[in-house]
Amino acid sequence: MLLRITYLLIFITTMSFTAVAQQYGPNTEGVSYGLKVGFDMQNFVGDDVDDAKLKPAYHVGLFTEVPVAPDFYAQPGLFLNSKGARFEEGPADGFFRINYVEIPINFLYKPIVGNGIVTFGGGPYVAYGVAGQYEISGGSLTMESDIEFTNNVRAEDGAGIYFRPFDAGVGIVFGYEFNNRIGLQLNTQIGLTNILPDVEGESPDTSVKNIGFGLSLGYRF
């Protein structure tokens, strides 16, 4: 059900931008599609996470690129992103890993520079958590637990690791696309929503958000 809704949103967004492109008739290249994979360094920011450290992560997905004015494009996409953070608790090391299905919509300025195209822009993203894991290890002992997604934690839920499923924020991208349509891109994502759920009987005074940066390799068909 979630994937159907996601595909529908991508379709509606693409058709809307395509209609604008046809109305203003900008670039002659037209709508294109692409694949992007990349390596990230992710972290948590917020209350009580001063000891959080960068964690290696990844992203992979598809995008559509629609011209909306000369050298300006809208780029909605559908990605699987890994986020989270590392931490240390005394002699023990651990990490949180949260996998999201993510829809970014970037607005790009792409002028021709040399034999290729410079890419600069950004835009909002929304994401939904689909799986996650918590692990802590020290010495010969290792403890693992799956992350559960909920907006509210009740007393009867018992002990566990809980996060909100929904995340949203903004991204910034800068890169270069070669004349063979292979592109390299630096990206930064700044989460704007608290991913910690409300806890029954406690004041919601703690906030944790995702933040990260990375490098992408893409190909536009």
Image (cartoon, grey):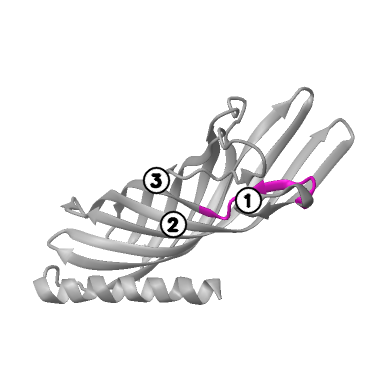
- Point out the tag, 1 or 3, that comes first from the N-terminus: 1
- Residue 86: x and y in percent read 65, 35
* Residue bearing mark 1: 152
Secondary structure found at label 1: strand
Mark earlier in primary sequence (2, 1) = 2
Q: Nearer the viewer, mark 3 or mark 2?
A: 2
Is 2 above or below relative to 70? below
Please tell me whether residue 42 belongs to the stretch shown in magenta.
Answer: no
Q: Nearer the viewer, mark 1 or mark 3?
A: 1
Task: Please give the range of residues in magenta.
Answer: 157-166
How far apart in space, not on screen, are marks 2 and 1 (Cα)? 20 Å
Badge 2 vs badge 1, beta-carbon distance below 8 Å = no
Picture quarter with the N terminus: bottom right
The picture places residue 189, in percent across and down from the top left corner, at 42, 44
Question: In the depicted view, which residue is nearer to us: 69 or 215?
Answer: 69
Crowding at label 3, few (<14), some or many (≥20) Cα neighbours within 10 Å?
many
The residue sitting at 37% across, 51% down in the picture is 184
Residue 35 rendering spot, x and y as whole percentages: 43, 65
The quadrant in which the C terminus is found is bottom left
- Under mark 1, the amino acid is Asn
Residue farthest toward the front in the current orientation of the protein: 201
Q: Secondary structure at mark 2?
A: strand
Dividing the picture into quadrants, the one containing residue 126 is: bottom left
How crowded pointer 2 is (Cα within 10 Å; few <14, some 14-19, many 20+) is rated as: some
Q: Is residue 180 visible?
A: no
Q: Which residue is mark 2?
A: 126
Q: Is residue 86 left or right of residue 119?
A: right
Q: Which residue is mark 3?
A: 187
Q: Amino acid at mark 2?
A: Val
